[in-house]
Amino acid sequence: MSTMNISLPEALKSFVDEQVSQRGYGTSSEYVRELIRRDQDRLQLRGMLMAGGASAPSAPADASYFEGLRARVRKSTKSGTKG
């Protein structure tokens, strides 16, 4: 694992220390890694949303569309259970 040193103003360092203590992180590094992972997830989601927004429209999501989804779930639930 690589090491990265960062400098924080005292107010931010205190905030990080408080978050580590209150949220059960073992170290400030664990807290920062979690923040970075969340930011990566956010960027990935944003990319998917942007791609979806730029894609061609498909069939409308009306009541029959959602009923079809429910039927598929019910069918997969019945066939997936052991009896």
Image (cartoon, grey):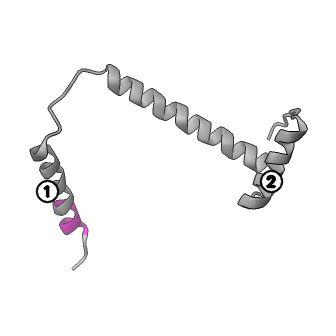
Circle 2 residues within 10 Å: few <14, some 14–19, many ≥20: few
Question: Which image quarter is the C terminus in?
Answer: bottom left
Look at label 2 and name its amino acid: Glu
Query: Where does label 2 land, which residue?
Result: 18
Span of residues in magenta = 75-80
Decide if residue 43 is on the left or right side of residue 6: left
- Residue 80 picture location, percent across and down: 24, 67
| Residue drawn at 18 percent across, 62 percent down | 74
Query: Where does label 1 land, which residue?
Result: 71
**Residue 46 - label:** none
- Residue 53 picture location, percent across and down: 33, 24
Q: Residue furthest left?
A: 64
Q: Is residue 62 above or below residue 49?
A: below
Q: Judging from the image, what secondary structure is the residue with disc 1 in?
A: helix
| Residue drawn at 75 percent across, 60 percent down | 22
Between disc 1 and disc 2, whose residue precedes?
Answer: 2
Residue closer to the observer: 23 or 34 = 23
